[in-house]
Amino acid sequence: MKKRYFFYLVLLTIVGIVLYAFFIEPKRIVTHHYIMGQNNGQKPVKVVQLSDIHIQKNYPASQLEKIVTKVNNENPDIILFTGDLFDNYATYGPSEEVIAALSRLNAPLGKYAVWGNHDYGGGAARVYPEILAAADFQLLENAGVNVPVSNEKSIYISGLDDSMLGNPLIADALAARQSDYTILLSHEPDKADELLDHNIQLILSGHSHGGQVRLPFTTIKNVMAEKYVEGFYDLANDTRLYVNTGLGTTKIPVRFGVPPEIAVFDLYV
């Protein structure tokens, strides 16, 4: 009898975990707050990073409304998107709904984005730039912009083309730099090791999804996110890398132990 009860308990636990991983955690959104730099008495620049939304039938455009609300409640100065807007645009690509939602994201100092590998695949390459432009995002394709944050200081926000399906060129990405503080967007985090000699203070990436499923003694890794999987990494030459675990899913619509993430950085520059 005891063995039967134990069997039922284990079965119920497994069923509960599966239901949670497929239907609850993928719809959760956690917001992580970080303070970077020394408080110099000035108001910090609030930067919000979004990544890997992967719009698909299991994560429809309507889910963007929760993201928009949470981001706007943070009152960001700058919004940065590190790629993978659609999972497979050819099979599910509600462009107008996505544009409408992303247009409601508010950031007085600008909204900037880079290519992800899924933005090139699935037929998205032909529409991704237009969707971003219609939603007031500036697509940084081996390019950058100096963003004034006070009367005396600016931040250089730079973006690399996707490292898997694009043509990343770091010299081009930094060519217009006239600021002392640089944020570089690179969809794939393992690219960071090639960027450490370029006086970059902060690299923001995604792509890994944090593995999507976290199991004891096991980390599921993605190509070009095998070394850097989630969170902060202190690299050489005072460069810091942050790997965002993303908002959506790919391949299997499941998350366990890695809830969808919005990252908020208060920067003292």
Image: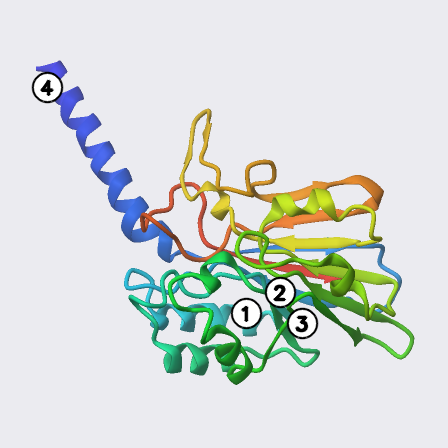
Q: Which residue is mark 1?
A: 71
Going from N to C along the chain, the mark reached first, 3 or 2, is 2
Residue 55, position in %: x, y? 38, 65
* Badge 4 element: helix
Labels 1 and 2 touching (C-beta < 8 A): yes
Labels 4 and 3 touching (C-beta < 8 A): no
The residue sitting at the left extreme is 1
Left or right of 194? Residue 116 is left
Q: Residue at x 52, y 81 (%)?
A: 135
Going from N to C along the chain, the mark reached first, 4 or 3, is 4
* Badge 3 element: strand
Q: What amino acid is found at the position of numbered circle 2 in the picture?
A: Val
Q: What amino acid is found at the position of numbered circle 1 in the picture?
A: Val
Q: What amino acid is found at the position of numbered circle 4 in the picture?
A: Arg
Cα distance, mark 3 to mark 1?
11 Å
The residue sitting at the right extreme is 152
Going from N to C along the chain, the mark reached first, 1 or 2, is 2
Going from N to C along the chain, the mark reached first, 3 or 1, is 1
Cα distance, mark 3 to mark 2?
6 Å
Q: Which residue is mark 3?
A: 78
Q: Which residue is mark 2?
A: 48
Give the image's coloring scheme.
rainbow
Q: Which residue is mark 4?
A: 4
Q: Residues within 10 Å of mark 1 (few under 14, many from 20)?
A: many
Cα distance, mark 4 to mark 2?
50 Å
Q: Is residue 130 above or below residue 173?
A: below
Labels 3 and 2 touching (C-beta < 8 A): yes
* Badge 2 element: strand
Cα distance, mark 1 to mark 2?
7 Å
